[in-house]
Amino acid sequence: MRMNLSRCILAGLGLALASQAQAATTGTIDSKLTLTAACQVNGSSGTSGVNFGALDFGTKDALFTTVDAQVIGGGGGAISILCSAGTVPVIRVGAGAHDGQSAGGSRALADGLGNFVPYDFYTDTGRTQLLAINGTITLPTSSGAAQTVNLYGQARGKAGLPAGVYTDTVSVELSF
């Protein structure tokens, strides 16, 4: 009887050990990330209200003839455009608030009292390559590194301008 009991214990132990062996199931996990093309202007992202920079002609006396300036981006230098690799960034410099209000330039700075200073944008330092209203600047295909865009301005004085602060706001669009 003892032998039978031992056999039963051993058989039970074998069953217990066999039931503790775990079954294995294998499979996969699918992972996914979708990237969309994107650009940053002067280090900022967004779809509206992005600051492309400022064209500041400084302070001149009311009898000036011409004054030159460069659009300064957020970092204190030229405009910086950083886009996804493989995109072709295109900047369109649109209309200003006072375009055509003063002879001598396609754009105009206004003092809010009906006085205007004509000015224009140019794509070269010599100010010979005029950038018309709604003109575009097409950048090389992006490698994923920031690209610099130099944009220049020239304002022209005219007789009878009163002292004051003259401003304009120009729309800009970046497509890619």
Image (cartoon, helix red, strand yellow):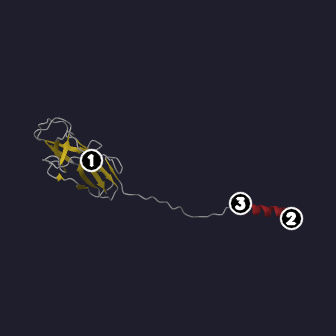
SS type, badge 3: helix
Which residue position holds label 3? 20
**Picture residue at 17% right of the left edge, 42% below the top:** 116
In this view, 161 is above or below 107: above
- Tell me which corner region of the image, top left, top right, bottom left or bottom right, holds residue 27: bottom right
Give the image location of residue 120, x and y in percent: 17, 48
Residue at mark 3 to residue at mark 2: CA–CA distance = 24 Å
Identify the disc placed on residue 79.
1
Q: What is the quadrant of the C terminus in the image? A: bottom left
Q: What's under tag 2, amino acid-wise?
A: Asn
Observer-nearest of 110 and 45 = 110
Earlier residue among tags 1 and 3: 3
In this image, 101 relative to 173: left or right? left
Task: For the residues labelled 3 and 2, say whether their Cβ atoms are less than 8 Å apart.
Answer: no
SS type, badge 2: helix
Earlier residue among tags 3 and 2: 2
Identify the disc placed on residue 4.
2
Q: What's under tag 3, amino acid-wise?
A: Gln
Residue at mark 1 to residue at mark 3: CA–CA distance = 68 Å
Dot 1 crowding, Cα within 10 Å, few <14, some 14–19, many 20+: many
SS type, badge 1: strand
> Can you see residue 168?
yes
**Picture residue at 20% right of the left edge, 47% below the top:** 152
Identify the disc placed on residue 35.
none
Give the image location of residue 136, x and y in percent: 23, 55
Q: What is the quadrant of the N terminus in the image? A: bottom right
Q: Please tell me whether mark 1 or mark 3 is closer to you in this view.
A: 1
In this view, 27 is above or below 133: below
Q: What's under tag 1, amino acid-wise?
A: Ile
Observer-nearest of 26 and 5 = 26
Earlier residue among tags 1 and 2: 2
